Image (cartoon, helix red, strand yellow):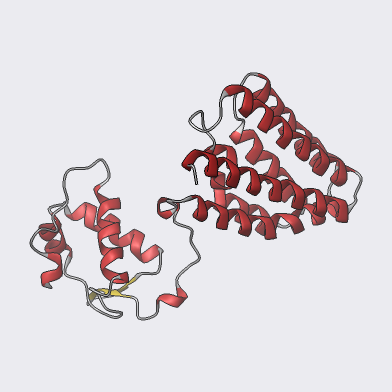
Amino acid sequence: MPSKMTGNTRIAPSKNLADILISRIREQIFDGELQLGDQLPTEQEMAEAFGVSRTVVREAIAALRSDGLVRTRQGRGVFVASNLDNRPFKIDTEMMNSAEDVMLIMELRMTIELEAAAVAAERRTKQDIAVIAEALEAVQKSIDIGEEGIEADFEFHCAIAAATKNPYFVDFLKYLGRIVIPPRYLNSAVLDADAMHDYLTRVQTEHRDIEAAIINGDSESARQATRLHLANGRERFRQQMKEKTGD
């Protein structure tokens, strides 16, 4: 077994040993300790080297295979993928350790949602409008009782994506998940209750503008309202993070 998986590589007790093992092997691949095409040690060897069960090893290998980092060859074992450029697209939320990381995802989100809003304005039905309105009312109720309304906010954007009648808009937005909702990062350590309420009220006003454009079937206005909303959200997030860090 390669020496890189021996010695002090054993994993300390944890609630999720598989995640830690996945991170260890990922590091070895991207640091070059494991080269493209290299064969990994056997399941038993990795279990012994890392001090985990074979079940944990199997779970980790399955996740790495899903990420396109390793390949299983029947009867031969597990190998590092020969070409990592063909890996499935994935955003690792655990690797988002800075405001800059979040800003990049918000930028990606903007390019998708501008067109989603425009298409939704063209294709929305009465039912779509009702679902969008329902989501906005849920956002408002959350604001009124002093909550951030992250779930309702996300459902509002998903409702717009659904109104496009293009399932890929919905799938991509749900793939990004709730990491795209800025209030998730603006907790009481950054804003007090009054400031958070004011912030969310401004956001809700922007939501209403998007809703109105979609109801009116105005694609360009929907696009512009969404651009303004997401650009403002990014700028608000940047300013709050700046205040938080004192930079």
Q: Quadrant of the N terminus?
A: bottom left
Q: Is residue 76 above or below residue 4?
A: below
User: In this orientation, does residue 1 appear?
Assistant: no
User: In this orientation, does residue 214 appear?
Assistant: yes
Closer to us: 116 or 208: 208
Closer to us: 168 or 199: 199
Question: Can you name the residue that lies furthest to the left here?
Answer: 7
Horizontal relation, residue 84 to residue 126: left or right: left
Question: Percent x, y for residue 49?
Answer: 11, 60
Number of marks present in the image shown: 0
Horizontal relation, residue 200 to residue 10: left or right: right
Residue 136: name its quadrant: top right
Question: Percent x, y for residue 77?
Answer: 23, 73
Residue 30: name its quadrant: bottom left
Q: Is residue 8 above or below residue 29?
A: above
Question: Percent x, y for residue 208?
Answer: 80, 37
Question: Which residue lies at the image location 48% right of the left edge and 61% below the top edge?
Answer: 90
Q: Is residue 135 above or below residue 11?
A: above
Question: Which residue lies at the image location 73% right of the left edge and 46% below the top edge?
Answer: 229
Horizontal relation, residue 5 to residue 161: left or right: left
Question: Percent x, y for residue 228?
Answer: 76, 49
Horizontal relation, residue 217 to residue 243: left or right: right
Question: Can you name the residue that lies furthest to the top here?
Answer: 145
